[in-house]
Image: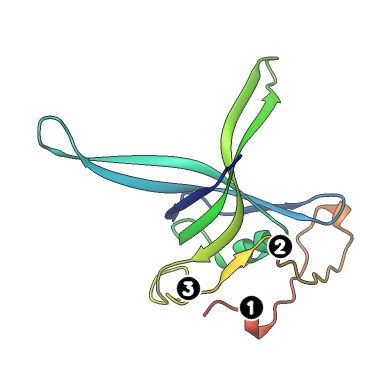
Amino acid sequence: MFNKVILAGNLARDIEIRYLPSGTAVATTAIATNRRYKAADGTQKDETMFIDLTFWGRTAEIANQYLKKGSQVLVEGRLTLEQWTATDGGKRSKHAIAVETLQMLGSRDQSTGMSNNAPAYSSEEQGAVETKQSPTEHTIPEIDINDDEIPF
Protein backbone atom coordinates (compact mmCIF):
# COMPACT_ATOMS: atom_id res chain seq x y z
CA MET A 1 0.00 0.00 0.00
CA PHE A 2 1.01 3.61 -0.50
CA ASN A 3 0.55 6.26 2.20
CA LYS A 4 2.18 9.61 1.40
CA VAL A 5 1.03 13.15 2.17
CA ILE A 6 2.69 16.41 1.07
CA LEU A 7 1.47 19.67 2.60
CA ALA A 8 2.60 23.29 2.40
CA GLY A 9 1.32 25.90 4.79
CA ASN A 10 1.93 27.87 7.96
CA LEU A 11 2.32 26.42 11.43
CA ALA A 12 -0.87 27.03 13.40
CA ARG A 13 0.83 26.88 16.81
CA ASP A 14 4.27 26.75 18.38
CA ILE A 15 6.16 23.46 18.49
CA GLU A 16 5.66 21.36 21.64
CA ILE A 17 8.57 18.97 22.21
CA ARG A 18 8.97 16.11 24.65
CA TYR A 19 11.39 13.23 25.03
CA LEU A 20 10.52 9.57 25.32
CA PRO A 21 12.24 7.48 28.01
CA SER A 22 14.49 6.17 25.22
CA GLY A 23 15.70 9.74 24.61
CA THR A 24 13.90 10.11 21.26
CA ALA A 25 12.50 13.58 20.64
CA VAL A 26 8.83 13.92 19.66
CA ALA A 27 7.46 17.31 18.60
CA THR A 28 3.87 18.20 17.79
CA THR A 29 2.19 21.15 16.13
CA ALA A 30 -0.40 21.79 13.42
CA ILE A 31 -0.25 23.16 9.90
CA ALA A 32 -2.83 25.44 8.33
CA THR A 33 -3.33 24.96 4.60
CA ASN A 34 -5.55 27.12 2.39
CA ARG A 35 -7.55 26.30 -0.70
CA ARG A 36 -9.21 28.95 -2.84
CA TYR A 37 -12.05 27.87 -5.08
CA LYS A 38 -14.94 29.31 -7.02
CA ALA A 39 -18.37 28.57 -5.52
CA ALA A 40 -21.40 27.64 -7.63
CA ASP A 41 -22.59 31.27 -7.49
CA GLY A 42 -19.26 32.45 -8.97
CA THR A 43 -17.80 33.99 -5.80
CA GLN A 44 -14.28 33.16 -4.61
CA LYS A 45 -14.21 31.18 -1.37
CA ASP A 46 -11.35 30.24 0.94
CA GLU A 47 -11.18 26.99 2.86
CA THR A 48 -8.60 26.51 5.64
CA MET A 49 -7.69 23.07 6.96
CA PHE A 50 -5.81 22.52 10.22
CA ILE A 51 -3.86 19.25 10.32
CA ASP A 52 -1.84 17.94 13.26
CA LEU A 53 1.84 17.14 12.64
CA THR A 54 4.22 14.90 14.57
CA PHE A 55 8.00 15.17 14.10
CA TRP A 56 10.43 12.53 15.37
CA GLY A 57 14.12 12.42 16.27
CA ARG A 58 16.48 15.01 14.89
CA THR A 59 13.74 16.55 12.75
CA ALA A 60 11.75 17.23 15.95
CA GLU A 61 14.72 18.99 17.54
CA ILE A 62 15.40 21.11 14.45
CA ALA A 63 11.70 22.05 14.17
CA ASN A 64 11.66 23.03 17.84
CA GLN A 65 14.77 25.16 17.47
CA TYR A 66 13.94 27.01 14.24
CA LEU A 67 10.15 27.05 13.80
CA LYS A 68 7.32 28.86 15.55
CA LYS A 69 3.68 29.72 14.94
CA GLY A 70 3.32 31.24 11.47
CA SER A 71 6.46 29.63 9.99
CA GLN A 72 6.02 28.49 6.41
CA VAL A 73 6.88 24.84 5.88
CA LEU A 74 6.58 22.04 3.37
CA VAL A 75 6.20 18.63 5.01
CA GLU A 76 6.14 15.14 3.58
CA GLY A 77 4.98 12.19 5.61
CA ARG A 78 2.33 9.58 6.15
CA LEU A 79 -1.22 9.74 7.40
CA THR A 80 -1.74 8.14 10.83
CA LEU A 81 -4.79 7.47 12.99
CA GLU A 82 -4.36 8.31 16.67
CA GLN A 83 -6.84 6.71 19.09
CA TRP A 84 -7.34 7.20 22.83
CA THR A 85 -9.91 7.01 25.59
CA ALA A 86 -11.08 10.39 26.90
CA THR A 87 -11.53 11.19 30.58
CA ASP A 88 -15.28 10.67 30.19
CA GLY A 89 -14.61 7.11 28.99
CA GLY A 90 -15.49 7.80 25.37
CA LYS A 91 -13.28 6.62 22.53
CA ARG A 92 -11.65 9.40 20.52
CA SER A 93 -9.59 9.42 17.35
CA LYS A 94 -8.02 11.86 14.93
CA HIS A 95 -5.90 11.77 11.82
CA ALA A 96 -2.43 13.32 11.90
CA ILE A 97 0.67 13.41 9.73
CA ALA A 98 3.85 11.65 10.87
CA VAL A 99 6.40 13.95 9.23
CA GLU A 100 9.29 12.23 7.45
CA THR A 101 10.75 15.27 5.62
CA LEU A 102 10.66 18.94 6.61
CA GLN A 103 11.43 21.82 4.27
CA MET A 104 11.52 25.29 5.83
CA LEU A 105 10.10 27.96 3.51
CA GLY A 106 9.94 31.73 3.63
CA SER A 107 12.63 34.38 3.67
CA ARG A 108 15.03 35.88 6.19
CA ASP A 109 12.79 38.93 6.45
CA GLN A 110 10.02 36.85 7.96
CA SER A 111 9.88 36.15 11.67
CA THR A 112 11.02 32.58 11.06
CA GLY A 113 14.51 33.65 10.07
CA MET A 114 14.59 31.00 7.33
CA SER A 115 15.86 31.41 3.77
CA ASN A 116 14.32 30.20 0.54
CA ASN A 117 17.18 27.73 0.09
CA ALA A 118 16.74 26.03 3.44
CA PRO A 119 17.68 22.35 3.43
CA ALA A 120 15.18 19.58 4.01
CA TYR A 121 15.49 17.51 7.17
CA SER A 122 14.50 13.89 7.37
CA SER A 123 13.60 11.96 10.51
CA GLU A 124 16.22 9.42 9.45
CA GLU A 125 18.99 12.05 9.74
CA GLN A 126 19.42 11.86 13.48
CA GLY A 127 22.54 13.52 14.82
CA ALA A 128 24.13 13.40 18.24
CA VAL A 129 22.27 15.21 20.99
CA GLU A 130 24.12 16.31 24.09
CA THR A 131 22.04 16.54 27.23
CA LYS A 132 23.03 17.93 30.59
CA GLN A 133 20.33 15.93 32.38
CA SER A 134 18.82 12.55 31.70
CA PRO A 135 15.89 12.47 29.23
CA THR A 136 13.62 10.91 31.85
CA GLU A 137 13.65 14.18 33.80
CA HIS A 138 11.53 15.72 30.99
CA THR A 139 13.75 18.74 30.47
CA ILE A 140 14.71 20.17 27.14
CA PRO A 141 18.35 19.32 26.44
CA GLU A 142 20.91 21.65 24.97
CA ILE A 143 21.21 20.78 21.30
CA ASP A 144 24.57 20.86 19.56
CA ILE A 145 24.00 21.80 15.90
CA ASN A 146 26.87 22.05 13.43
CA ASP A 147 27.12 25.08 11.14
CA ASP A 148 26.36 22.79 8.17
CA GLU A 149 22.92 22.05 9.65
CA ILE A 150 21.81 25.68 10.01
CA PRO A 151 19.24 26.32 7.27
CA PHE A 152 20.26 29.90 6.51
Q: Is residue 92 left or right of residue 42?
A: right
Taking depth in this image into account, of 89 and 35 the one nearest to the observer is 35
In this figure, which residue is indicated by the disc labeled 1?
A: 149
Q: Which mark is residue 16?
A: none
Amino acid, disc 3 = Met
Q: Locate residue 79 relative to residue 40 in the image: left or right.
A: right
Contact between marks 2 and 3 (CB within 8 A): the answer is no
Q: Which mark is residue 114?
A: 3
Specify few, some or many for label 3: CA neighbours under 10 Å numbering under 14, 14-19, or 20 or more: many
- The residue that appears at 87% across and 50% down in the rendered structure is 21
Q: Amino acid at mark 1?
A: Glu
Q: Position of residue 94 (x, y in %)?
A: 58, 30
Kind of residue at badge 2 = Glu
Q: Would you name the residue on which mark 2 appears?
A: 124
Q: Position of residue 113 (x, y in %)?
A: 47, 74
Q: Residues within 10 Å of mark 2 (few under 14, many from 20)?
A: few
Give the farthest residue toward the bottom: 147
**Image position of 47 (left or right of 24):** left
Q: Determine whether, in the image, residue 41 is placed left or right of residue 142.
A: left
Depth check, front residue: 73 or 80: 80
Under tag 3, what secondary structure? loop
In the picture, which quadrant includes the N terminus? Answer: top right
Q: Answer with mark 1 or mark 3, whichever residue precedes in sequence.
A: 3
